[in-house]
Image (tube, helix red, strand yellow):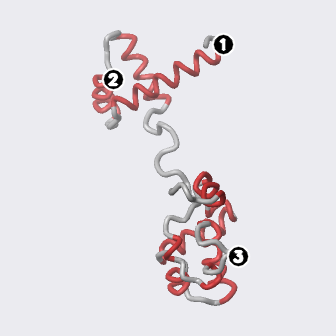
Amino acid sequence: MTEGADAKERALADQGVLNPKPESVSDERFRDEGFFDARDLVQVKYEMVRRVRAEGATVTEAAETFGFSRPTFYQAQRALDEEGLPGLVPKRPGPKRAHKLTDEVMAFVDELRERGSGMNAQTLSQRLAERFGLSVHPRSIERALARREKKRQTSSGTP
């Protein structure tokens, strides 16, 4: 974003709802400097869905007018139906937690570490592949162990 970006553009970017392609919105309501702002991704998606539902535009017309694909239209429609306006806010991609490193897997890691004190993350990763068929990057194991250690220190009151 350029230094000349206004406060609204910065706020939209901070919230993760800055439309990456505002120039692709060709709807006339978004051309005027008024209420409608092509930089506001939530507003653009909402208006795209509303145009089909309330004004009878076709999905293809609406998607093209608002700079999206038909699949994106259907995703926005489903998100709006299921979650309301917050559903139009983009989600962070990727896993939300260490989904492979379940309690069972971490118990096995603990067991291995107790038996072999010098066992590094690379070796632990290989053992997880052998035992569980999991492909876990050694750095993921290190992070999971560090998170758990930090949690233990916090709960025991040790800084």
Dot 1 or dot 2: first in sequence order is 2
Query: Residue at (66%, 76%) from the top-left corner?
Result: 33
As measured in the structure, the alpha-carbon distance from the residue carrying label 1 to the one carrying label 3 is 54 Å
Dot 1 or dot 3: first in sequence order is 3
Amino acid under label 1?
Gly
Query: Residue at (54%, 77%) from the top-left corner?
Result: 25
Disc marking residue 121? 2
* Badge 2: residue crowd in 10 Å (few <14, some 14–19, many ≥20): some
Element under label 3?
loop
Amino acid under label 3?
Gly
Query: Residue at (49%, 69%) from the top-left corner?
Result: 21
* Badge 3: residue crowd in 10 Å (few <14, some 14–19, many ≥20): few
Q: Quadrant of residue 73?
A: bottom right
Nearest the viewer among 93 and 105 is: 93
Amino acid under label 2?
Ala
**Position of 103 relative to 68 (above/below):** above
Element under label 2?
helix
Q: x, y percentage for residue 111?
A: 41, 16
Mark 1 sits on what residue? 157
Q: x, y percentage for residue 44?
A: 61, 72
